[in-house]
Amino acid sequence: MQKKDCVAMILAGGQGSRLGSLTKKLAKPAVPFGGKYRIIDFALSNCHNSGIDTVGVLTQYQPLALHSYIGMGSAWDLDRKDGGVFMLPPYAREQGAEWYKGTADAIYQNINFIDMMNPNYVLVLSGDHIYTMDYAHMLNYHIMKKAEATISVMRVSWEEATRFGIMNTADNGRIIEFQEKPAQPKNNLASMGVYIFNWKTLRRYLEDDARDVASKHDFGKNIIPKMLLNGQRMVAYQFAGYWKDVGTVESFWEANMDLLNDEPELDLYNPNWKIYSVNPTRPPQQITATAKVSQSLISEGCTICGEVEHSVVFPGVHIGEGAKVKNSILMPYAYVEPYAEIDKVIVGRRSLIERSAKIGSSDAEIIVINENTVIPCESDIKHNGMVPKRQVG
Amino acid sequence: MQNVMGIINLNGDEKLLKEITECRPLAAVPFGGRYRVIDFVLSSMVNSGIENVGILLHDKYRSIMDHLRSGKEWDLARKSDGLFILPSGQPRLPGSKLGDVDNLYHNLDYLENSRQQYVLLSGSSMVCNINYRKAFKYHQDSGADITILYKEMAENEGEQAEGMSLILDDTGRMLDMSFVSKTLGVKRMSMDMYILKRELLIEFVKECKSVGDTNLIRDGFYKNRDKLKIYGFQYKGYFANIHSLQSYYKHNMELLKVDKWQDLFMKAGLVYTKVKDEAPAKYQESAKVANTMVANGCIVGGRVENSILFRGVKVHKGAYIKDSIIMQKCEIAENAIVENVICDKDVQITAGKWLKGEKNYPLFVEKGTVV
């Protein structure tokens, strides 16, 4: 194994429980997004586009979808002779098996992996954020500032600042104080959960943290405050651009809808910063003579005979004649029969909306329909409590 | 089908396709919104369980090699067997008579070293989605030396078709084979796909070469039709023979019918192609699209009717595209009007331009042109 300059570690074990039934069978990073992607595609594509060729993916909650999706990483050009993608679920050792107890513990338990790669720097990422970012640029900044740790931050609104880890910085970018979800924020520079550490330093802190029984083994709560306390040189790297943590059904829906503006903040069409994903083998979409489509993203293999407005449509979806789809997200292979009307609905994979069913409305809550669910003919569903749980086969 | 190897012969007659094959072989001509013509035969072979495929190149082969690369998209990047690129021994000079015999002879090592007992030899102008297993079983059951796949043409289709017509007896044995053009009409059109023993193919290649014959089908198979048992096998699925710009246009447009779309892309198996990692197609607020096939990566702000948009096409607000085929990465600017046009890759139609061809004679715009 050649020595690596920088190894990326993507934290992808989270359940994302606030996403409700969207994460019933898969981890949050594996949730489909944007008409063709899964959330983790953004972190993986950023790695590839930033020239990072060694990536560890730490999985824990419902890892099957994620493991089979990533495979050997060829979709992101991460099937490499030297390096590449490594799936790192918790494992058993001589003293027994342990789950990852926190973000820092997940990295700690994989010290052997990182040592094997022997990098100078470790880039710690979250697998459930939607953004495009050049990590190479951040790494250069880290090296230029001679920092022990660099934390990527972005300006958020003052109301939102209470939900984030807030960095207070000196003029030279050095972090002087860190507040985790402060009630009275002194600043609005929020941590994006993207960190670069000098590996030797981080390794020492991880080992200390593992011995600390009182610790929550979390980067934001333990490692970062401890490093600050000890006076380590830590700097903030300011990011400007689109970034979203799709933590709730609302923010997931919003992030999808954000893509539908004529000039969206997040550019999926930049030939120099492609978002890679496992491509379904499907023909081009068919927009038939009876169809009307506007302000929407539609993917390969779809047959659209009805009206689609302001919606995100994944591969292989069928929308029948006279059906109306508005403000909705249709997961792969969903089937909408003729004259059904849906508004502000997330339709799960392979679900069937039967003829003339009516679901949701643009001024009500977002209705989530699980995968493989049948919504019978003529039903009129106004809120989530009315969604039937009957599954197809 | 592990006992069958595939060979796709790119050495075909392309003169009627004009500019569209100027920079590429017919096999590499973009088709059906995101594919190249070769994808259909190649995917059919792979879906039928063939694991060893040789591509017999002729000339202008940069684009086909760029498309196929390692064969990974077709699951043909393998440790043993997989995809083999078989270039011709010498470049074809204009007017020279080098044919597929020379080409095969030059790659005799590949034929001799392959471990499969049978060969499926296919031309490259046919678009179809076929499960070869049935044809192979027929070949084994009938005891034929050579099985030729054919398509029964409907009456109105046959008149426009061009290719080899088969004359079969009641048992399916081939009595004669003739080249037909537009005027004669075809009843049973040869699909230019042949199943035979590998040893037999090698024998033909050596024999033809030794007497200076150049065309394997004419000089090898046809001349020996009395000595050989040549049978026809009828294929019943989607079929298109791309032999002219008109037929190219017609067969692309045909895919706008939902049943044809299903038949070609889904029925026998999925069709693989080089992946471009394009984002989903985006329809802006001003988009008006009807009866159109759209590939990923397109951004549509204008009006599109009865057309095919390949990957990464941009249609600006106020533009109007009708009855046209717009290939990869073309850009149609504001208020441009395009009707009955085939735009090759990377064409830019600037604002306010008006381009119009005829239904039976579409206007072709060469690759990279700025209008």
Image (cartoon, coloured by chain):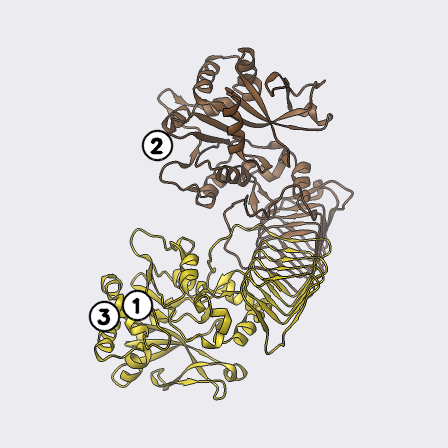
Q: Secondary structure at mark 1?
A: loop
Residue beneath disc 3? B199
Q: Quadrant of the N terminus of chain B?
A: bottom left
User: Compared to A230, does B18 lie above or below?
Assistant: below
> Would residue A73 be seen by someone viewing this image from the given angle?
yes
Respond whether the residues carrying marks 1 and 3 are from the same subunit: yes
Residue beneath disc 2? A2
Q: Secondary structure at mark 2?
A: loop
Residue B303 lies, in percent from the top left, at 70, 62
Q: Quadrant of the C terminus of chain B?
A: bottom right
Q: How many marks?
A: 3
Residue beneath disc 1? B90
Q: Tell me if mark 2 has few (under 14), some (14-19) or many (20+) residues whose alpha carbon lies within 10 angstroms of its own.
A: few
> Would residue A307 be seen by someone viewing this image from the given angle?
no
Chain identity of mark 3:
B
Q: Are marks 2 and 1 in contact (CB under 8 Å)?
A: no
Query: In 3D space, how far apart are the residues under numbered discs 2 and 1 (Cα atoms)?
Result: 43 Å
Residue A169: quadrant of the picture: top right
Looking at the rendered structure, the kind of residue marked 2 is: Gln
**Which chain did the image draw in brown?**
A
Query: In 3D space, how far apart are the residues under numbered discs 1 and 3 (Cα atoms)?
Result: 25 Å
Query: In 3D space, how far apart are the residues under numbered discs 3 and 2 (Cα atoms)?
Result: 48 Å
